[in-house]
Structure formats: C-alpha cells, structure tokens
Amino acid sequence: MRKICIIIRVYNRVEDLKHCLSIIKDTWTNFEYYIIVVSNGKKKGFLVDQESKGKINQLVELEENSGHLKGNSQLLLQGLPYIPDNCDYTILLEADTWIYSDVYIKKYISKLDKGIAVWASAKWYDSIFSLATDFAIVQSKFIKNHWQILDFGTRPEDYVANFLIDNNFQFIYITENMPIHVPSYIHHYPYTRGNRFNMFPKAKMVTYHVENLKGGMQKKKEYFNILSNTKYFDILVEKSSTLERVIVQMSIYFSYLLPRKSWFNIVRRIK
C-alpha cells in the first residue's frame, strides 16, 4: 500500500490531538500513513499522553516555543527532516482539525499525481491569494527542497500562496473545504465564528477551537458525529443529524450570494 506522511502540529490542544489520531487510525484507510507529531507545549505542561504516543510513528517535542505565528512555522520546519523518503506526499495538519475518512485525500493526491501542481488546500481568503495551512496536501520532495515556504513570520496563508506564485509553482484548491470565510461586514452568520466556517459537510471536517465553542469538546464531538453521519463518538446527539447537515450545507451555499470584494476587484496579493 502506498505510504503517505502526516505532520501534525500541536501546542496546547493535546485532547484534540488524541481524538485526531484516533480518527485517522480508524477511518483513513486508502493509504498507509506515517504520522509525525511535533509539539512545543511540553514546557508549559501540555504533554502528549501514552495512548496518543502509541499511534505516532515519530514524536518531536521541542523545548522552546517561538510564539504564535513563528511557533506554527517552527513546528512545521522541525517535522520536515523526519519525512520518510518513500512518502511521495505529506499532509500538513493541525491537531484540532478532524476529518472523517480519507476519500478526499485520495481524490486530491490523484490530481497532484498528474504533475500539474505541488500543493493542494482550500482558498483561505476571498479577496487575496491565500492557501489554508490547517489542512494541506503537499508534494514531499517539493517541501523538502523548498522548506522556505514554511519559514513564515506573518500570516501563513498569504505567505504560502505568494511563495508559490513568486517561484512559478502551481497549486490547486480543495473545494470541499470552501468557502472558509464570509465577508467581514457580516457580524452574525450561522455556523461561523469570527466570520469563519468551522464545519465542512462535504469533507466531513470539523475545525472548531473548543474554547470558542459553546459546549466545548462535547459539542465538537456532536458536530463530528453529525457531519460524518456516524456514531463515531459515543455521545447523545440531540438534533436530527440529517437536518443539521442540510442546514450547515445550505448556510455555506447561501454564503456564496453575499457580495464580496472579489466581485468588484481583481484578487490581490499581500507582500
């Protein structure tokens, strides 16, 4: 079976990591996965537990944390040397991003196999060139040879897109994870926080930060069961899963009708 690498980065979301690893082990079945976890929260007491360690091929625990954005870069860069040579692709994943099944991973690896692009992820912002980094599928050889793409100190989504464009590398969008944002003039919109969607029914993906979710981890598990249409987590789902999925998907569809800057301006770049 073809082997794919996963680099999961984590600071304080060690409970998210535990569930993320279980979901991968239980539902990602199309490839053999080599899992690297890079953590920089140990000094603050955020420890990877023994159960999680048993599902990890390579654990890298860093003593120092470089801060929010630079710390994100630090985690990714420290994981690169551990990517096995026999993994053609590497998935970049944040610990709080849960995805049921690897069907869409298989779909986009097939697209990348055609050699047209080196990177696949969702479009992050509508009005500028940007690429999501919480979940991305990247050609391993490319990312090893061009590690500078992960050496960002500013918003990674803008930096990554600009790096690819400046160096004439192609990327493709993972459309099942789009749109991510609604326009900033919208102050309240269903299933968003900070103008951002955190559930993607087509991809069966949940990305909530539990501290920003009423009901915390229990609610995140409930949403995961709803989007995956399973009883993966042994909890009571009070609402109709089918109806809830339809409402979430309709909220996403209707968001496309909201006027956006990109309708009136050429999509711009941030330097």
Image (spheres, helix red, strand yellow):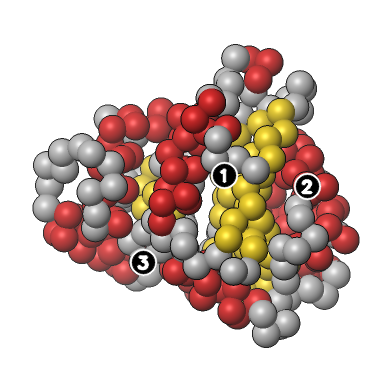
Mark whose residue sits in front, 1 or 2? 2
Q: Which residue is mark 1?
A: 94
- Local crowd size for mark 2, using a 10 Å CA cut-off: few (<14), some (14–19), many (≥20): some
The answer to whether the residues at label 3 and label 1 have Cβ atoms under 8 Å apart is: no
Q: Quadrant of the C terminus?
A: bottom right
Of the 4 image quadrants, the one containing the N terminus is bottom right
Q: Residue at x 72, y 71 (%)?
A: 118
Please report whichever mark, 3 or 2, sits nearer to the chain's N-terminal start: 2
Q: Nearer the viewer, residue 19 or 218?
A: 19
Q: CA distance from mark 3 to mark 1?
A: 19 Å
Q: How many marks?
A: 3
Q: Mark 3: which amino acid? A: Lys
- Cα distance between the residues tagged 3 and 2: 31 Å
**Figure check: 264 above or below 136:** below
- Please provide percent x and percent y for residue 36: 66, 44
Q: Which residue is mark 3?
A: 202
Q: Does 251 appear above or below 8? A: below
- Residue at numbered disc 2: 82
Up-down relation of residue 252 to residue 53 (above or below): below
Distance from Cα at disc 1 to Cα at disc 2: 17 Å
Q: Which mark is residue 133?
A: none
User: Is the C-beta separation of discs 1 and 2 under 8 Å?
Assistant: no
Q: Position of residue 88 (x, y in %)?
A: 72, 67
The kind of residue on which mark 2 rests is Tyr
SS category of the residue bearing label 2: helix
What is the x, y in percent for residue 3?
64, 63
Labels 3 and 1: the sequence-earlier one: 1
